Amino acid sequence: MKRILLTVLALGSLIFANAQSEYYDKTAAHKYNLRPIYTAVPSLQIAPDARAGGMGDIGASSAPDLNSQYWNPAKFPQMQSNGGIAFSYTPWLKNLVSDINLFYLTGFWQFAPKQALSASLKYFSLGEVQFRNNDSDPGVNVKPNEFSVDLAYSRLLSECWSAAVALRYIRSDLGGGVSNELYAGNAVAADIAVYYLQPLRCGAGSDLALGIDISNIGSKISFDDGNTKDFLPTNFRLGLAFGYKFDDYNKLTIMGETNKLLVPCQYEKDGTLMDDKKYSDISPISGIFKSFSDAPDGFKEELKEFMWSLGLEYSYQDQFFARCGYFHESQDKGNRKYFTFGAGFKLNIFELQAAYVIAQGNNNPLDKTLRFTLGFDMAGLKTMVSNKRAQN
């Protein structure tokens, strides 16, 4: 009972489907249209920062920024600054509960020409939950949580191309440290990313960018002492961005992005739910390849597993920003559909970003989600301190 309750809690916080009558009823052995891709540690899929959150959750091909670690760490060698840190906060599903929160801390350092190191810490709190074995049990309060920490190395390969690799440690404690039936899960994973940024002649400062990021390639994770193992949300992300600079002050960037979970479908070709043991025995690497050809309805359903986003970013003097975007997921795969809006400003050493979600559909728990990001340019801060010391 404890395992069921906490698993539902973790998955329920991230399943945003509005499918009202289309689902798979295993008890009735009846087929419907909803066949989402299930993964463990779903918090790894939550966009952590406000800039990308204001553009429909786009970040693989957008201009390099302090939060590139999550979206595409290959962007760091092409940053104008040589160091910085950022902190992001998201009160998650605040329309339903008040104590589920996402915290994200990230930073980078260009330690040598054309090379950079970057890291991040992501912490997802599922709030406080009371656990009881029966109605007469007074229960115990637990605080389920998930977190990940990673380190990436990136390098400029040519004038336009850069690449990166990242290593990540992941821990998911859905039992809050007190459950005897639900163990804390641990896993390791890696990311591979490339980024291409080409200046264009159609206006000084205009550019074309391409970004590819494959994240969370790694081991499986177990919550029952290794008896069964679940897939991490291995994800493929591809983005394209075109930025046009009208003059010395105004620039507009148009972005498009698609991403797909590289995780096998948990349904047989006839649409029946696969046996848990059989599904658990699929290796992570085999799962990546199977994810492109295992949908029960064939190629048509495989296309539905691709999520896509469109985004716009307007900047004035590279200091003031306005953003909007749209995110789309097939109704049969989760039905997340929402518009996003964002704004921000950046000074020499300081930046503040905010984003807001307007979800489609009635009673969508994503509606009115807010994100905030605070960033600091450490190189600029160091220069300012040195200048003040020189003046004194």
Image (spheres, rainbow, N blue to C red):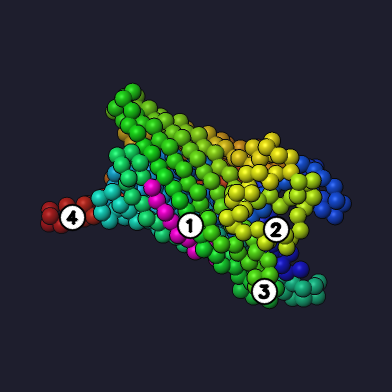
Q: CA distance from mark 3 to mark 1?
A: 29 Å
Q: CA distance from mark 3 to mark 4?
A: 53 Å
The picture places residue 348, in percent across and down from the top left corner, at 28, 45
Q: Quadrant of the C terminus?
A: bottom left
Camera-nearest label, 2 or 1 = 2
* SS under mark 4: helix
Camera-nearest label, 2 or 4 = 2
Q: Amino acid at mark 2?
A: Tyr
Camera-nearest label, 3 or 2 = 2
Give the labeled residue for mark 4. 386
Which comes sooner in the sequence, label 2 or label 1?
A: 1
- The residues colored magenta run 163-171
Q: Quadrant of the N terminus?
A: bottom right
Which circle marks residue 279 in the picture? 2
The picture places residue 288, in percent across and down from the top left corner, at 59, 51
Q: Badge 1: few (under 14), some or many (20 or more) residues near its Cα, within 10 Å? A: some
Task: Answer yes or no: is residue 128 visible.
Answer: no
The picture places residue 328, in percent across and down from the top left corner, at 61, 37
Left or right: 168, with 18 as reference point: left
Q: Amino acid at mark 4?
A: Ser
Quarter where residue 249 is shown = top left
The residue lying furthest to the right in this view is 28
Which comes sooner in the sequence, label 1 or label 4?
A: 1
Which circle marks residue 190 in the picture? 1
- Residue contact between numbered discs 3 and 1, judged by CB atoms under 8 Å: no
Q: CA distance from mark 2 to mark 1?
A: 22 Å
Give the labeled residue for mark 3. 179
Q: Amino acid at mark 1?
A: Ala
Q: Please report the residue visible at 59 percent of the width from the left and 62 percent of the height from the top.
A: 220
From what the image shows, is residue 202 above or below residue 313? above
